[in-house]
Amino acid sequence: MSERAPADGGAAATAGQATSAAAADPRLVRVALSPPYDVVVGARLLHEVASRVPQSAVAVVSDEAVWALYGRGLAERLRTAGKRVVEVTVAPGEGSKDLATYGAVVRALAAGGLGRDAAVLALGGGVVGDLAGFAAATYLRGVALYQLPTTLLAMVDAAIGGKTAVDLPEGKNLVGAFWQPRAVLADVATLYTLPPRELRQGVAETVKTGLIGDPGLVDEAERLLVTAATGEGSEAAGLGGPGGAVPPGALVDVVARAAAVKARVVTEDPHEAGVRAHLNLGHTLAHALEAASGLALSHGDAVLYGLVYAAALGRARGLVDVVERLARLVHRLRPDPLPDLPFEALVPYMARDKKVLAGRLRFVLLEAPGRPVVVADVTEAEMRTAWRALEELMR
């Protein structure tokens, strides 16, 4: 994961954006689990962390890029508030979500002398959230976790719901735990420092979330975010770029709507025993593409291809046809190229997917926008045909 430095060294790209960001009203989304917690979506929330985290000793886990932007300032504010702070940084990127880095993180917590009354603050994108969350879930058999997502992907998906994990060479997210955060503080001001490629990753998850639970959110993502994520018509792409500027209030609304969908799903199914599988729309192929490409393809780009693939499977079965719309969206977003892989190279990874039950691979498809369904009788012939359709559509 990479982020670019804001022009003023603060939480927004410009002083004007920082001022308008401060004026954006925060939104609260309740995750009604036991115990319940809030997803707070607003601007400049990183300046309020010290008052929202009661623990007197904390570990701030981040990657080196995010630490340079936000970690030092956050640690200073926490210390000013009288808290003891342990700083833990890892290399940016999916490669840090492995057992070796996990081991280094929990050893850093131990070396810092953190006890069971401490808290882990996961400052960063989905990789940091998964890694730090798994560390919090397992260190001393579990300490408090606060998710402080700084990417759109993490805000609308990874930071909510308590799924934490690291990867194995055999596949993504194969070692992990369910560990709910005490709170999620999504500061949309951090999104103004995201380069277009990283913003694109979050657009993919926002579209997925809209497809399964809020179809109007897909329209909003296209209206507000696609131009910013691609730099269409502008060299200065990003949320603050000319022609792509998105006001903080609109970001708060989009993120809060996506968070509300995920909150509803995880409240109904906290341990992925039923409807929570709907959140994996597009992910069966996506995870296989990531693994088979040696992580050369990013998660968000893989999800974009996975959504088109799932749509092709659904259309062939007489379900809703959103193939062309999604294919057009993918072409506009300009993800990295679909890996040139034979279908046979993907099968072993899909066979290890977490949705496999009793040897049967399950796919999430759409009966209609906002109406996902899990099917367990997709044949290999159907899967192969959908792969050929995806390859044709992405040419």
Image: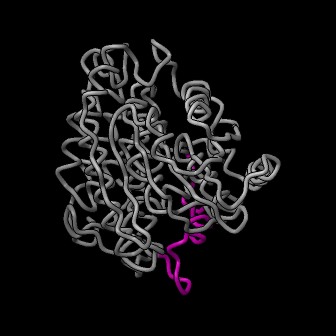
Residue span colored magenta = 340-361
Q: Between 206 and 299, which is closer to the camera in this rendering? A: 206
Q: Is residue 252 magenta?
A: no
- Residue at position x 33%, y 48% from top? 206
Q: Can you give x and y, in whole percent of width and height, for residue 329 in the image? A: 28, 41
Residue occupying the point 26% across, 65% down: 315
On the image, the x and y values in percent for residue 166 come to 65, 57
Location of residue 169 by image quarter: bottom right
Q: Residue furthest front?
A: 82
Left or right, 309 with reference to 354: left
Query: Relative to 233, is 213 above or below?
Result: below
In terms of depth relative to the viewer, which is nearer, 234 or 140? 140
Task: List x then y, in percent, for residue 386.
Answer: 39, 61
Where is residue 76? Give x, y as percent: 60, 28
- The image shows a total of numbered marks equal to 0
From the viewer's side, name the closer residue of 360 and 135: 135
Residue lying at the far bottom of the rendered structure:
358
Magenta span contains residue 344: yes
Q: Quadrant of the N terminus?
A: top right
Q: How is the image coloured?
A: one colour
What is the quadrant of residue 93 in the picture?
top right
Residue name at image x 48 percent, y 59 percent: 285
Task: Using the image, determine if residue 25 lies above or below residue 209.
Answer: above
Residue 395 is drawn in which quadrant? top left
Q: Residue at 23% x, 38% y: name it.
A: 222
User: Where is 153 relative to 306, above or below?
Assistant: above
Q: Is residue 2 above or below residue 279?
A: above
